Amino acid sequence: MALVELLMPKMGESVAEATVVNWQKQEGDNITVDDIVVEIATDKVDSEIPSEIDGVLVKQLFKIDEVVKVGEAIAIIETNSDEVDVKLPFENKSTIDNVSNVTDLLIEKAEQTKQVLDTSLSERFYSPLVRSIAKEENILFEELETIKGTGKENRVTKDDIKFYILLRNEKKNKGIEQELEQKTVQKNSSIKANLSEPVLQEIKQTSVSFSGDDEIIEMDRMRKKIAEHMIMSKQISAHVTSFVEADVTRIVKWRDNIKDEFLQREGEKITYTPIILEAVAKAIKDFPMVNVSLDGDKIIKRGNINIGMATALPSGNLIVPVIKNADTQNLLGLTKQVNKMAVKARSNNLSPDDIAGGTYTVTNIGTFGNIMGTPIINQPQVAILAIGAIRKIPAVVETPEGDVIAIRHKMYLSHSYDHRIVDGALGGMFVKRVADYLEAFDMDKKI
């Protein structure tokens, strides 16, 4: 007999933990190789952990809704092997008398790993993740109780406590002696934040009345995560948006000429998205300071150009699969990647790695008939580009014979950026460069 730890696998370069959603196997159940043992969820996608061995599930080390870090043991499986293949909390494995003793030690080790801040005296609920963050940041129970939550029933979310920590650190760095007052808002409220003087202005939520004709819809898990992420982004970043109109007549004509042949040859459509991503990647190489992140007062200049493309799901939620190293791929490669990610997103088959590592984001609001917008930055990035609908409009065109009015295909580009890092000159020049690349598209281009 031997015991093996079922470990929480790596879920992508930016994913450090996941929440247990459902146990497919219960304690005492027989398990064969590739059987799904447990379902987990990260902020963006759900996933499953299969067994790599045959055996019996001896112990579930985490309950539903508890948070597991990458590399932690999530369950113990008993096999018929003669060797004990586990990381035990002692050096001499020969001291173990029987399987029961090994199990007890493994459970003890897991429980030690899961130690979090004791909030049993509180009148409100704190998730294991929030308690774990509080413990890591040395936030005492009394201090935790002062944090205003934006979650259901005023619960403190992960973004609430991280934003509190950001402001607390800002206070320490500036030597401010007064108590830090953090006031966050509930859904459908606006918030004013000044990071140079970390004090949030409290805005009371208006009570919502409803009648018997109204329908109350509970947010699903992904919608709650999106809401938290959007509020956090607006709290942290100083959003500014610049607009440019691009003449994409050459692109429209080129695509009209090759789309049928491309569909017949490749078995898939070519859309405007990969053409736009190609232009964005070129512009990022020209202006690399939009491809950065901010860590405190340190600017992290990204070595890779990984462009996220916001994609609508059948549920109405949005998800952002990432095209890795977009600047190294030709138009055919980008087309293949865009189509692949779109299919995976709409069939709910994206992996955690598919949505990890983005350094810049593009969202196509033209799909919904919108001509321009003010998109919210996808943290921890510092900029995002919204692509409007392509419209036929009359425009003045310069010719050798003089100016004429002609029908042209035009599109607005809306560039939102974090004014803490990206000044108006850089943000404006970048989006203008994207438009320049689109307008100079080679109509003889082969794909």
Image (cartoon, helix red, strand yellow):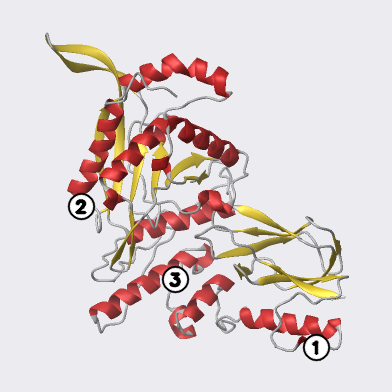
Mark 3 vs mark 1, foreground winner is 1
Residue 274: percent from the left, percent from the top? 43, 33
- Badge 3: residue crowd in 10 Å (few <14, some 14–19, many ≥20): many
The residue type indicated by label 2 comes to Asp
Label 2, residues with CA under 10 Å away: few <14, some 14-19, many ≥20: few
| Residue 60 sits in quarter | bottom right
Marks 3 and 1 in Cβ contact (< 8 Å) = no
User: Is the residue 122 above or below the residue 54 in the image?
Assistant: below
Return the residue nearer the eye: 77 or 364: 77
- The residue at 62%/80% (across/down) is 113
Which of 189/147 is in front? 147
Left or right side of 378 for 35: right
Q: Mark 3 = which residue?
A: 161
Q: Residue at x 51, y 16 (%)?
A: 261
Q: Residues within 10 Å of mark 1 (few under 14, many from 20)?
A: few
Which type of secondary structure does the marked residue at label 1 adopt?
A: helix
- For the C terminus, give its image quadrant: top left
Whether residue 373 appears in this view of the structure is no
**Alpha carbon of mark 3 to alpha carbon of mark 2: how far?**
29 Å
Residues at marks 3 and 1, CA–CA distance in whole angstroms? 45 Å
How far across and down, in percent of the image, does residue 158 sit?
49, 67
Q: Earlier in the sequence, mark 2 or mark 1?
A: 1
Please provide percent x and percent y for residue 353. 55, 52
Residue 411 badge: none
Q: Which label number is shown at residue 423?
A: 2
Residue 283 in the image: state x and y as whole percent.
29, 40
The tag earlier along the polypeptide, 3 or 2, is 3
| Amino acid marked by disc 3 | Ile
Residue located beneath label 1 in the image:
94
- Assign a secondary structure to mark 2: loop
